[in-house]
């Protein structure tokens, strides 16, 4: 191992630390001292030779440091994401230097993917936030949770490693709450209920999800629902997610016999005679804890015009 410290790029960030605790694993010590960086990010810095202990490069995350040791960490500047920034109108519900919450329109893909290399929410965010600190060493926004292309509504975006890690933990611990509104076919017999049915890849169509036993690869999925308004043979329903599986509301709604109106994948093929850009499903409310201040934020995303128009037409037909 070299005895000298490598020169630091002028745009890199450098931390000089003096260990004041008992013997502790290096990655754990750094995670405690540098909370703005995720533990996985720090482990990658260690493995990349960007951490020195007593002027010696230390590339083992399992190495231990003790009281009196000097630790130096060099964080290279975030690498630009190899995507084109694209100017796009964004409906911002909340924003500061740590995170933002947007009201995503239906039809907008969140993440670039085969067939959608441009025109995505990430492309728009790169233009809106040109000075991102970066997530995991890459200059990109942190997508904490996703919305389907044709689902509108509130979505949270992390701007820093710390915010990304904190928000992910909230969704995993189920302290972050997501509430949706949807128009579904049929009239549920009860006013409220819970669907507890595991979701996995459809055994006959890999592009779809389905209720699949956990023994066959399904993951537990829980959706709470309650009737908001009965509109004849369709119903406006509020959904609260306890878990966040792919297409969870759409799959669970169809599973209990009330598919979401306009859903081209899990719907019944029926039509209500109103043109929709996708399924009548909207992420209405998002409640989470600010990753730095600890304050609770509740963002409410107004439903899009087509959703409101659909409900108004259905009310008229139902004579309400």
Image (tube, helix red, strand yellow):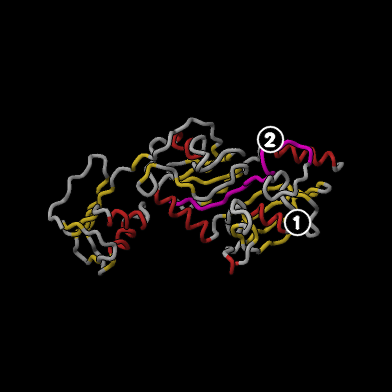
Write the residue at 46% across / 41% down. Answer: 96
In which quadrant will I find the C terminus?
top right
Q: Quadrant of residue 215?
A: bottom right
Callout 1: SS: loop
Residue on which disc 1 sits: 257
Write the residue at 60% across / 38% down. Answer: 107
Residue on which disc 2 sits: 305
Left or right of 42, for residue 289: right
Mark 1 neighbour density, 10 Å: few (under 14) some (14–19) many (20 or more): some
Percent of width and height locating residue 9: 22, 42
Query: Residue 278 lies in magenta, yes or no?
Result: yes
Q: Earlier in the sequence, mark 2 or mark 1?
A: 1
Left or right of 168, for residue 231: right
Q: Which residues are magenta?
A: 272-292
Left or right of 182, for residue 97: left
Looking at the image, the residue that sits furthest to the right is 319
């Amino acid at each position: 191992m070299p005895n000298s410290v490598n020169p630091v790029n002028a745009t890199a960030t450098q931390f000089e630390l003096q260990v004041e605790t008992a013997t502790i694993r290096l990655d754990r010590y750094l995670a405690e001292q540098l909370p703005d960086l995720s533990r996985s990010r720090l482990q990658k810095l260690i493995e990349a030779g960007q951490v020195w202990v007593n002027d010696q490069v230390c590339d083992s995350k399992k190495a231990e440091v003790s009281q009196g040791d000097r630790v130096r960490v060099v964080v290279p500047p975030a690498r630009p994401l190899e995507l084109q920034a694209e100017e796009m109108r964004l409906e911002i519900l909340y924003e500061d230097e740590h995170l933002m919450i947007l009201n995503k329109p239906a039809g907008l893909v969140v993440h670039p993917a085969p067939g959608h290399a441009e025109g995505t929410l990430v492309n728009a965010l790169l233009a809106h936030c040109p000075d991102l600190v970066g997530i995991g060493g890459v200059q990109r926004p942190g997508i904490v949770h996703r919305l389907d292309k044709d689902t509108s509504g509130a979505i949270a975006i992390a701007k820093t490693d710390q915010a990304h890690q904190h928000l992910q933990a909230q969704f995993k611990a189920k302290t972050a709450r997501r509430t949706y509104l949807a128009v579904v076919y049929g009239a549920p017999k009860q006013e409220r209920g819970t669907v507890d049915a595991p979701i996995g890849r459809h055994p006959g169509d890999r592009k779809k999800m389905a209720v699949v036993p956990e023994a066959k690869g399904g993951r537990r999925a829980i959706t709470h629902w309650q009737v908001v308004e009965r509109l004849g043979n369709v119903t406006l329903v509020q959904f609260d997610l306890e878990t966040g599986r792919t297409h969870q509301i759409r799959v669970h709604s169809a599973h209990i016999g009330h598919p979401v109106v306009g859903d081209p994948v899990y719907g019944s093929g029926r039509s209500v005679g109103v043109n929709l850009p996708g399924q009548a499903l909207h992420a209405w409310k998002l409640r989470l804890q600010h990753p730095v201040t600890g304050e609770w934020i509740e963002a409410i995303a107004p439903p899009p015009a087509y959703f409101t128009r659909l409900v108004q037409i259905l009310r008229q037909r139902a004579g309400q």
